[in-house]
Amino acid sequence: MRLIVTLLGVLLLGSLMACSDSRVPSVKKDSSLAAIARGKIDIEGGLLNITVPEEGIVSEINVKVGDNIKAGDVLAKFNSEQESLALELAIAQINHSQLELDALKIRLKNSEQLAERWQTAAKEGAAQQAQADEAQQNLQQLHAEINSTKSTLEMANIKRKQAQHALSLRTLRAPQDAVVAKVAAQAGISANSSTPSFVLLPAKPVIVRAEINESFIGQIQKGSAASVSFEATPQTAQLEAHVVYIGKMLEAGHWGDEQQQTSRVVECILEFDQPQHYLIGQNVMVKFHAEH
């Protein structure tokens, strides 16, 4: 009888333990992940904010949103009447000085011949030495006038370059191949350097800028694989990417909740394995794969 009771106790204890174990869910650790970070879609080098060097009235706009432009293409022109007049005046001064210099050179050649004849005649007694000396003085005066005209011509050339530079500042050009993303300038309206007149999307690869918490820095390196998903549409397929750069300094986080923004992070830049075309500024989640 004691043996039967003992056996029943053992069986009952085993049943209770089995029931207890069935209520505890098993936790599986995802060993394929090294870290998870928030990030944003960006363009290599960032967007280009084009501003005017100095305030002026927009006289002409040459592009519109969506245009594909090449480096050097004119985006807009600004009121340049004063600069244009300065350039015309400088060119007129150059032409006048050049004509005057050419005429002086002809006079110099004739005067040199005349002075040589007077000097020869004076030596032979056919003319007075005073006449030969006067010819030499005229020759020296012509040299002085030529030097003065050359200086005037040089100054006019400098003014021309200054006017051309001032005129170039009144023309906005694309610094590189890009797509026009925003046009803020309006013809007939004043533009200033404090507000971008144009925003350009450079023709460069789309990248991801992610912020890695300092506790995960040692687990990620250049070349590490990652998967990128969009916070707004997490159900969409994840995109494969790889790390191309890891920052060299710690800074405060910019994205996420208040706690995450007070933590220290390192910027990480990733490139997609396949070319992608997404909106710049989209929020993403980046899952860094552990190295095996």
Image (tube, helix red, strand yellow):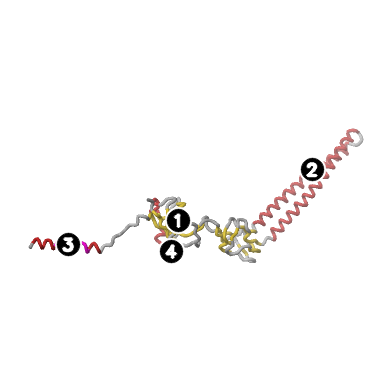
Which one is in front in this view, the residue at disc 1 or the one at disc 2?
1
Q: Residues within 10 Å of mark 3 (few under 14, many from 20)?
A: few
Give the camera-side residue of 100 and 5: 5
* CB atoms of marks 2 and 3 within 8 Å: no
Mark 2 Cα shell of 10 Å, populated few (<14), some (14-19), many (≥20):
some
Q: Amino acid at mark 2?
A: His
Which class describes the residues within 10 Å of circle 4: few (<14), some (14-19), or many (20+)?
Answer: few
Verify CB contact (< 8 Å) between mark 3 and mark 1. Answer: no
Q: Which residue is mark 4?
A: 236
Marked residue nearer the N-terminal end (3 or 1):
3
Specify start and end residues of the magenta stretch as a single range: 9-19
Q: Quadrant of residue 226?
A: bottom left
Q: Would residue 235 appear left or right of 199 to someone viewing this image?
A: left
Q: Position of residue 115 (x, y in %)?
A: 85, 39
Going 67% across and 62% down the picture, which residue do you hit?
79
Element class at badge 1:
strand
How far is the residue under mark 2 from the one under mark 3?
124 Å
Where 136 falls versus 41 (above or below)? above
| Helix, strand or loop under label 3 | helix
Q: Amino acid at mark 3?
A: Leu
Q: CA distance from mark 1 to mark 4?
A: 15 Å
The residue closer to the viewer here, 13 or 149, is 13
Residue at image mark 1: 241
Question: Which residue is the site of mark 3?
Answer: 13
Query: Tag 2 or tag 1, which sits nearer the N-term?
Result: 2
